[in-house]
Amino acid sequence: MNFCSNCGQKISFGKVPDDEKERFYCENCNIIHYQNPKIIVGTLPRWEDKILLCKRAIEPRKNLWTLPAGFLENNERIEDGAIRETTEEANAEIKIVRLFSVYSLPHVSQIYCIFLADLVNLNFHPGDESLEVELFKKEEIPWQKIAFNSIRFTLDKFVNATDLTDHEVHLGTWNKK
Ligand SMILES: [Zn+2]
């Protein structure tokens, strides 16, 4: 961050009153520009004994498989964002079942929130950001070609869940090595 989004002047970085952390602030407006984590919302859509995955059409991780997910918009509920992303990437009609996993990536300040969902029909097809959208049985999941650790974590918890009705939310963190 270089310039104030309020007045356009160059902003400063450093200690501000009553705060442990250093912040970006504008001396002209006398406001602090807080920076907070980004939330990524998505779904794990299922149909009978299969789950839906999307092959990415865009970088990063182009050509690898992922669950439909993307950044939450301002003023949007997380479940609405998850449904929107599922529509955008897979044109899939779903019903949210429940929150399934929350995965933190502290080193890049991102949080993934993935909902378990049921497909309403099989009329899905790739959106602009997907090359392919397909259903996979648990034993068919392409583990070597999964785009993100957060998604691999969620798929692993799903595959190994003994009881999907127990409402457990799986908490995970990526530990950068
Ligand atoms: Zn300013």
Image (cartoon, rainbow, N blue to C red):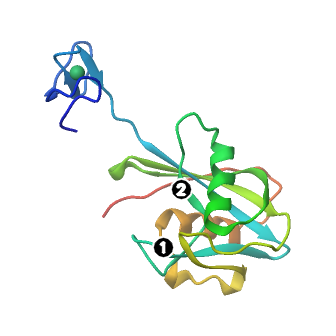
Q: Please give the name of the residue rendered at 30% of the width and 64% of the height, measured from the top-left corner.
A: 177
Q: Secondary structure at mark 2?
A: strand
Q: Which residue is mark 1?
A: 147
Say whether residue 61 is left or right of residue 112: left
Q: Which mark is residue 2?
A: none
Viewer-proximal residue among 80 and 163: 80
Residue 83 location (% of width, % of height): 69, 53
Query: Image quadrant for the N terminus?
Result: top left
Residue 106 location (% of width, % of height): 38, 48
Image quarter for residue 79? top right
Judged from the image, the quadrant occupied by ligand 1 is: top left
Q: Which mark is residue 70?
A: 2
Say whether residue 153 is left or right of residue 123: left
Q: Secondary structure at mark 1?
A: loop
Count of picture labels:
2
Q: Is residue 100 visible?
A: no
Q: Please give the name of the residue rendered at 61% of the width and 38% of the height, measured from the top-left corner.
A: 76
Instruction: Give the residue type at disc 2.
Output: Gly
Residue 21 location (% of width, % of height): 25, 27
